[in-house]
Amino acid sequence: MSTLVPSLFAGLVDDASLLPPSFVSLPDAVAKHGEHRAGWFAGLLGPLLVPASLIGGDLPAREVPVALVGDVPVSALPVAVEKLRTAGAVVLHVEAPVARRGEDPQPGLGQLRALAGNDKDIEVYAEIPLSWGLLGALDTVAECRAEGLRIAPKFRVGGLAAELFPTPVELAAVVCACRDRDLPFRLAAGLRHAIRHTDPETGFTHHGFLNVLAAAILAVEGAEVAEVAELLAATHPLPLVEPSRLRRDGPRPLFVGFGAANVVEPLTELVRLGLINGGPE
């Protein structure tokens, strides 16, 4: 792993170049991911996110860290994992939704619990809707982890409708709920930039990935929901950069990572903020 990327940001950004609405082919995405991993910023990268629906009989034989995104029934995921492994990929984790908004997440969690129990070599991320049944679902995930299962939550914090973007207070409550249960989490959708901002085209206000990181740091230090929400709501870099700078040589708390369609964009913002240097001269 590149020593040019501080420990706090190690593996923070998953390569989401294959996720919709991308038109990149699987071989091209694998090749480009390999190029990124040969670069000075390789330490920033998480795995290449591969939708299970793309796993057919023609896979590029190349050792590359991947994560399987479950856009097919959970019952089909083990076969997709084995196909990736046969092609030489290193499957780090699987992530799959457990329910739609408003549905009971427990049955879906039961399926992923079985998946985690049957394959001890991968981490399973259960995508839990930020709606009814959330806290009960987190309790179930915590119970699974207490049993030794490698399972953790994932949350969507954006999308094509305003209600899919949680408020800072709502997201702060989720971060603190994960803190209280000792649950690492992943995030998906909406994290386009380091700092919270409003998209001029849609009018939707997006969470910043640096806001989330700084909020997670504050949460593990014992902050209450209101204090964590203040950092999530910040639109100026100052209160976010300093906590990150102070902790950048240590492990990242709670917030495992997020996907970016172009991994160079979050890298560029972290360089601009002075949190990662600009690479070898």
Image (tube, helix red, strand yellow):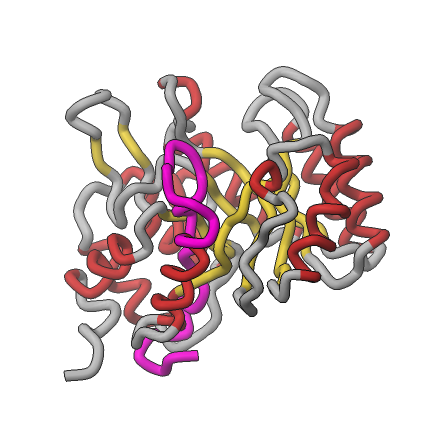
* Above-or-below relation of 159 to 59: above
Residue drawn 40% across the image and 38% down it: 226
Q: Which residues are magenta?
A: 1-28
Identified at 38% across, 80% down, the residue is: 2
Is residue 179 visible to the viewer in this orientation of the structure?
no
Q: Residue at x 37, y 37 (%)?
A: 22
Name which quarter of the figure residue 165 lies in. Answer: top left
- Give left or right: position of 140 versus 177: right
Is 265 in front, or is 71? 71
Residue 136 location (% of width, % of height): 72, 31
Left or right of residue 44: residue 151: right
- x 58%, y 28%: residue: 129
Q: Is residue 18 above or below residue 269?
A: above
Q: If the image is split into quadrants, where does the N terminus sit?
A: bottom left
Check the image and report above or below for 280 versus 277: below
Q: Is residue 19 magenta?
A: yes
Determine the image quadrant of residue 166. Answer: top left
Q: Is residue 244 left or right of residue 26?
A: left
Work out whether residue 29 or residue 108 is closer to the camera in this orientation and state it: 29
Residue 138 in the image: x percent, y percent?
68, 39
Q: Main secondary structure of the magenta part?
A: loop
